[in-house]
């Protein structure tokens, strides 16, 4: 029996952790045509799960690259008959709105990072226009759903940012007088680069493992530090294995906009699976969950600068965190992925 066909639109190259999980899940019930942007398809961890996988070479901020991407999307869109369309984030939906309008009954909007929460501007009319179009809106947690205008709640689905259940080795590899921090995902000054740089300079017992995407020059410099091991972009399972052997996972968000304050980082749930505590700043709302369940170290604030005390605290507390089996069983992708498929089948 032929599977229904799904068009998946993103400006990622197929290496994003959440996209990996979504593609693998959707591929069970759909033939997927993926159109994205990237430097190459060498990091396309989901290519094998797609019927067709098209990557426009380059960076998405390059106007010429994005123009080529637009042509590729429209060519795929008009020359194939799709049963459903999955589009990542509001910016892509707004760009292709004139074309997608006619197939809005097939459209699912998946909001990872809301441009309306990041902008801080009064763009309610544009947001409402954007949210009226799709048949379903996907967000990553109940808090994010509460930020969606109430008139769109009926078609908003929460598909949590949980990882696959982890069954690997969780033995820590650092010595009692060493401290290893795992820094992964999107890495920049707004995600904690400065803290790690200062901890490395303050305390020689500190080392860092990095894996993911570097977004600014200070983070490139951090990656070259002699006590930093930069591993590039890795799969989610490899990332979790690395995290399992470290003492902490860094999960900082500079409180510069509502999108960061209301972040739903998969690192929190990675931490639960691999038994490695997080480091998070108090301004992020999910920090209350971290403190309540005692699964990490909560900084008083993102801009806290008593680095010597932070290093001492992290060292003293690194072996004091406990992760319950109840949490491990509750927060898995396997437990929630059905909601993603349902969003397309409804």
Image: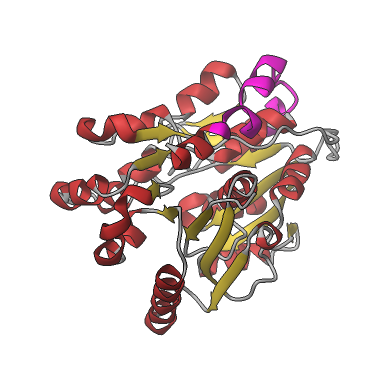
Q: Is residue 231 above or below residue 177?
A: below
Q: Confirm whether residue 304 shows in the render.
A: no
The residue under the point 47% across, 65% down is 11
How many marks on residues? 0
Which residue, as the protein is rendered here, is positioned at the far bottom?
Answer: 64
- Magenta span: predominant SS is helix
The residue under the point 57% across, 72% down is 54
Percent position of residue 75, x then y = 43, 76
Residue 148 on the magenta span: no
Percent position of residue 285, x then y = 41, 30
Percent position of residue 181, x then y = 69, 44
Relative horizontal placement of residue 243, taking residue 5 as reference (left or right): right
Relative horizontal placement of residue 241, taking residue 220 as reference (left or right): right
Front residue of 201/257: it is 257
The residue under the point 29% across, 34% down is 147
Percent position of residue 288, x then y = 46, 23
Please identify the quarter of the rendering in which residue 186 is found: bottom right
Q: Is residue 164 above or below residue 45?
A: above
Relative horizontal placement of residue 167, taking residue 114 as reference (left or right): right
Q: Confirm whether residue 303 shows in the render.
A: yes
Residue 318 on the magenta span: yes
Quarter in which the C terminus is drawn: top left
Residue stretch rendered in magenta on the structure: 314-338
């Amino acid at each position: 029996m032929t599977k229904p066909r799904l068009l998946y639109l993103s400006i990622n190259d197929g290496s994003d952790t959440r996209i990996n999980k979504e593609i693998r899940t959707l591929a069970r019930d759909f033939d997927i045509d993926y159109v994205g942007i990237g430097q190459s398809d060498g990091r396309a961890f989901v290519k094998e799960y797609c019927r067709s996988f098209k990557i426009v070479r380059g960076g998405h901020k390059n106007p010429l690259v994005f123009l080529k991407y637009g042509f590729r999307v429209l060519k795929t869109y008009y020359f194939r008959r799709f049963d459903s369309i999955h589009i990542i984030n509001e910016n892509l939906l707004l760009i292709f709105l004139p074309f997608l309008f006619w197939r809005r009954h097939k459209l699912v909007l998946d909001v990872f990072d809301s441009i309306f929460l990041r902008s801080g501007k009064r763009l309610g009319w544009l947001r409402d226009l954007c949210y009226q179009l799709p048949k379903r809106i996907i967000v990553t947690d109940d808090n994010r759903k509460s930020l969606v205008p109430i008139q769109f709640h009926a078609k908003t689905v929460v598909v949590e940012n949980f990882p696959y259940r982890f069954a690997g080795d969780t033995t820590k590899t650092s010595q009692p007088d060493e401290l290893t921090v795992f820094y992964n995902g999107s890495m920049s000054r707004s995600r904690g680069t400065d803290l790690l740089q200062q901890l490395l300079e303050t305390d020689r017992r500190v080392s860092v493992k990095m894996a993911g995407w570097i977004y600014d020059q200070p983070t490139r410099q951090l990656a070259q530090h002699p006590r930093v091991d930069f591993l590039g972009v890795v799969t989610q399972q490899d990332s979790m294995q690395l995290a399992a052997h470290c003492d902490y996972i860094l999960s900082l968000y500079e409180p510069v906009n509502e999108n960061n304050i209301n972040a739903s980082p998969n690192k929190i749930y990675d931490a639960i699976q691999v038994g490695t505590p997080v480091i998070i700043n108090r301004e992020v709302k999910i920090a209350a969950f971290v403190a309540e369940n005692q699964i990490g170290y909560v900084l008083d604030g993102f801009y806290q600068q008593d680095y010597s005390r932070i290093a001492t605290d992290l060292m003293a507390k690194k072996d004091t965190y406990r992760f319950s089996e109840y949490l491990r069983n509750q927060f898995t992708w396997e437990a929630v992925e059905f909601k993603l498929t349902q969003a397309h089948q409804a």
